[in-house]
Amino acid sequence: MPPSSIEIDAISKRFGRHQALNAMSLAVRAGEFMSILGPSGCGKSTLLRLIAGLDDPDSGEIRVAGQPGKRPGKRRLGDRGVAFVFQTYALYPNLSGYDNIAAPLVMRELNGFERLPGARLLPAVARKRRSIDSRVRAIAELLQVAPWLTRKPGQLSGGQRQRIALGRALVREPSLFLLDEPFANLDAALRHQTRAELTALQKRLGTTTLFVTHDQSEAMAMSDRVAVMFEGAIRQVATPDELYRNPVDLDVARFLSQPHLNCLPAKVILDGHVLIGGEHVALADARQPGTEGIVGFRPEHATLRPRPASATVPGTLPGVVERIEHAGADVFVFVRLLAPDTTCTIRAASHEMSRWAPGTPCAVALDAASGWFFPRRPMQTAALGRTEVAAA
Amino acid sequence: MSERLRSIAANAVLAGASLIMVLPFLWMAMASMAPQGEIFSGAIFLKPSLQAAWGNYAFAFSRAPLLRYMANGVIVCVAIIVCQVAIAAPAGYALAKLPFRGRPVVFAAIVLGLMIPIQVPAIPLYIGLAYAGLLDTYTGLVLPFIISGFAIFLFRQFFTSFPDDVIDAARLDGFSELSIVRRLMLPAAWPAVAAFAVFSFVANWNDLYWPLVVITRPEMMTPPLGLAAFRASGDSAGNVGALMAGGIVITLPLVIVFSTIQKQFIRGMAAPAAPAPAAPAPASQASASPAPSSR
């Protein structure tokens, strides 16, 4: 089937008192690989289930391939060209790997009579069975699962099950491919490998793909575009590069800068200048003098400079090294600022590690072009200090 | 040492209890092979003889159509089990997995129905079957039992733990609701089906009450009813050995059925949770999400 585009128009969904989706809109282009990125419980899995037709939105409309979609009823779900890969893989426990992959074809292309074991004797049925068999074999070849086809899911490892689940989704050549955290149960090495393979596969097949994840590195690495979701609504849709450079608000910046984003309360004093803890700091993103808000910057968007013990360096933030964390090629230096009284995380090259022993006075120099200024909104007053990983 | 003593004591108690359970059957087996005089001697352990055994079994088979009774029993029991599973599996699926208005009430009603013995609706059932002209037929024997609240309850318990994701995946793959039950749920619940089949078979095979109500023609009689008729007839008067031989013959199929699916039966009773291989526990997320690399 040709890849489908999706238009989601102001859909809402409520479960009891929990508003899972809140008048959410999103457009996905045909053939695009889009990730839905957000923290646990932000409604991203609900969104995927609505697109698949497994649930109905309370209001709003989802159009797949331009078709204004009333849900076709459970009976007809299988006729849509939608394939779904579940986090739990959802393989049929009593069927072999082969039968799992063949199931969508058998159920859609053979009727009840033709599925009977003896019906194979009829030439027409035998022909259909052969066609199914060749497609299952081709997919098994593509995903390199051929050796495990005779085993049941219970006898397969997590990675093997995951491939069988991918095979089951791909075998019917869907026009829309939905994946709900498909790598969450894989170990790190396997996850990276599968990630690369899936991206390559998607490029080759050109199927519109929606990929739900809470892992920002996964979303950034795989997607054409990423839709960031919070509290049942989309905050930003952008390419990974755009998202990295220009997050639309503090939540998005934080989520994409895990594990560390430095957040400091600040006030714009001139265009391109902010006041942080009494120091004037240059920041290109600062606009509208008088606005209060928060300056956010990544550990790699500031440098550490030496500072005399009882003096300050103009244009930088004075502090004292608190502790230091080794991260391979780099080190993260945790600096206690003098004002505001909070900790910043700065990245440094690991050979500089000896310079920044705990207790060393230092100055944090922001990269004026890369930091962000987020004007304070009524809701964000509490958000100060270094963020911790919020992923569940 | 005390450990060992305790084990011996426990085994002795169990052995004693087993003996009490087994003794009537053992006596039935011995009596079916013992001569008349031996049986009436009042001894607990009888001396069997080949000649007496032959005589007793031959008498039972010649005077009572035991094979016919057993064939009736098999037909009725199999028909009942097939209908019960065919009805209870979709019903259990609906109660376990399909939310609908009033589902708790329906489920409560089914559990409540388990407490009502057949004797309560016996007269309306009898009158209904009489009007339908179904007395003295297999249908009359089977029809009142095709809906089993116990089976619905048991299947519902098993199906509840079946993963919802698998059902959703099946729907997207084009399975109908009934094919989900038949192709996915029932195979996964096979131990429960086996356990239920044993229960159902034993209960219906041994049932005397309902056949007694609806059956009068000897050729329609089920094993217990046939045996009762054999005892009541003048033929067997005083021939306890032959009666016991009949008893052995009609008990044997149950022993065979149970011993063949004993393993599933115990599994089905011991673990009313679907043995479906669940996904591995989600790995810790925080451990493996490196920060995005800078450009």
Image (cartoon, helix red, strand yellow):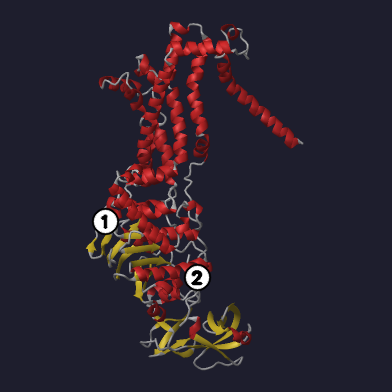
Q: Disc 2 to disc 1, how far (Cα)?
A: 36 Å
Residue A321 relative to residue A20: left or right: right
Q: Tell me if residue A43 can be seen.
A: no
Disc 1 packing (10 Å; few <14; some 14–19; many ≥20) = some
Q: Mark on residue A71?
A: 1
Disc 2: which residue: B289
Q: For this rendering, which residue is in front, B111 or B223?
A: B223
Residues beneath discs 2 and 1 located on the same chain = no
Q: Quadrant of the N terminus of chain A?
A: bottom left
- Subunit under mark 2: B
Up the image or down, B103 lies above or below A323; here it is above
Q: Position of residue A120 (x, y in %)?
A: 33, 46
Q: Position of residue A234 (x, y in %)?
A: 34, 70
Up the image or down, A118 lies above or below B54; here it is below
Q: Position of residue A216 (x, y in %)?
A: 44, 72
Disc 2 packing (10 Å; few <14; some 14–19; many ≥20) = some
Q: Secondary structure at mark 1?
A: loop
- Residue A68 found in image quarter: bottom left
Q: Position of residue B63 (x, y in %)?
A: 44, 10
Q: Are marks 2 and 1 in contact (CB under 8 Å)?
A: no
Residue B196 relative to residue A70: left or right: right
